[in-house]
Amino acid sequence: MRPLASADIKREKEFQRLFDNDDNTIVIVGMSLTDPNIRRFIHRRASGNDLPSGKVYAIMKSGGGSIDRHTSRFWDDWGVAPVLLQNHHDLPRLVRDIQWGPSSPAWFEETTAWVRKRVPDPLAPAWQRGARVALVECLNYLRRYFAVRQEERLSISLFLPLPNKALEQEEAASHIFMCATTGRDRDLTRDEIWARRLKIHEHNSEGVAGQAFIGSIPLMVVDDGRGIDSHFGEAKSRDWNRGIGAHGRTWRSIYSIPVLDGPHWLPIGVITVSSNMGEPCWKRMNTAGESELKTVLRRSARSAIANTKP
């Protein structure tokens, strides 16, 4: 099964070969089905003498109710099954599940390998300093650009999946770890990174950052709302709220942004911004401002991973 994006239409011969093979199951993503070329391929496939064994699916935005019913009936005559999404944020996870399987750990191994090539040692002082500088510069930029109130304290943290050997822990698989943060003015220790780990699971990932990672969607919780310690359990919630050493949790709201990259556009980490305010600065932003916030955070995360300036 192969998702098809709009760029593929330029490779007409490959496109034709995919549609002419009746055994291929095709998923069309980000393409207008009003395009005469794509309609020609679909019509030729549907009007053949034999019913193709492979199906054609098209990812579409749901219009709700009668619109969805009409859409499904219309495209059924063309041999296309619409997959209707309520929100475009659901698309990355859907494409990932199509390619890797809905419960497959294979994609997590792929993303861990991607990170390992770029962060072979998250405890290396040079990487720690470079990552922290990238996050601090991002924080300073956000405060200036969005005119964050002086009384609002923000902190930015970067969570990454790491291989077992990076932390010398056999249980490191299927977790993401807080590898860098503006909440510390020094390098993080192995124990601190290990203590700030979130288990990743298809149905019960831990924390807002863990759920943003597995779902590949931005998630926020404000004013100590429901889900802020999702799936932690009593002991873990107590440990995280108490913090390491004398410092407890000083934030009330959090916004977790997944970072997607690599050849298969998989989640390779999560960058979070937390606030001590019940109504944090991002809740007061318009759509354009929130989009800029997510762009800046993702750019900062990639800079921190690569140890380059944002």
Image (tube, rainbow, N blue to C red):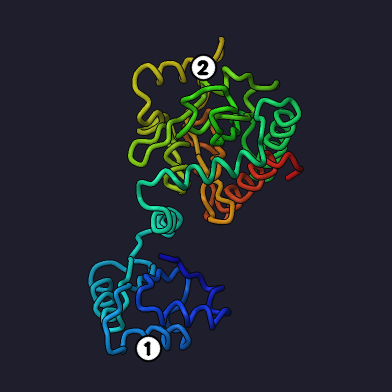
In this rendering, the answer to whether 93 lies above or below 2 is: above
- Eyeballing the image, is 303 above or below 180? below
300 lies left or right of 43:
right
Q: Is residue 51 above or below residue 83?
A: below
| Label 1 Cα neighbours within 10 Å, binned few <14 / some 14-19 / many ≥20 | few
Query: Residue 124 in the image: x percent, y percent?
Result: 71, 26
Give the image location of residue 179, x and y in percent. Answer: 60, 30
Callout 2 secondary element: loop
In the picture provided, is 81 more to the left or to the right than 237? left
Residue 307, percent across and down?
A: 73, 39
Residue matched to label 2: 243
Q: Quadrant of residue 271?
A: top right
CA distance separating discs 1 and 2: 62 Å
Q: How many marks?
A: 2
**Secondary structure beneath disc 1?**
helix
Mark 1 highlights which residue? Answer: 44
Q: Tag 1: residue type? A: Arg
Query: Dot 2 surroundings within 10 Å: few (below 14), some, or many (20 or more)?
Result: some
In percent of width and height, residue 60 lies at 38, 69
| Amino acid type assigned to the residue bearing label 2 in the image | Gly
Between 170 and 267, the one nearer to me in the picture: 170
177 left or right of 93? right
In the picture, which quadrant includes the N terminus? bottom left
The reply to whether residue 300 is visible in this rendering is yes
Q: Residue visible at 65% across and 45% down?
A: 302
- Which of marks 2 and 1 precedes in the sequence? 1
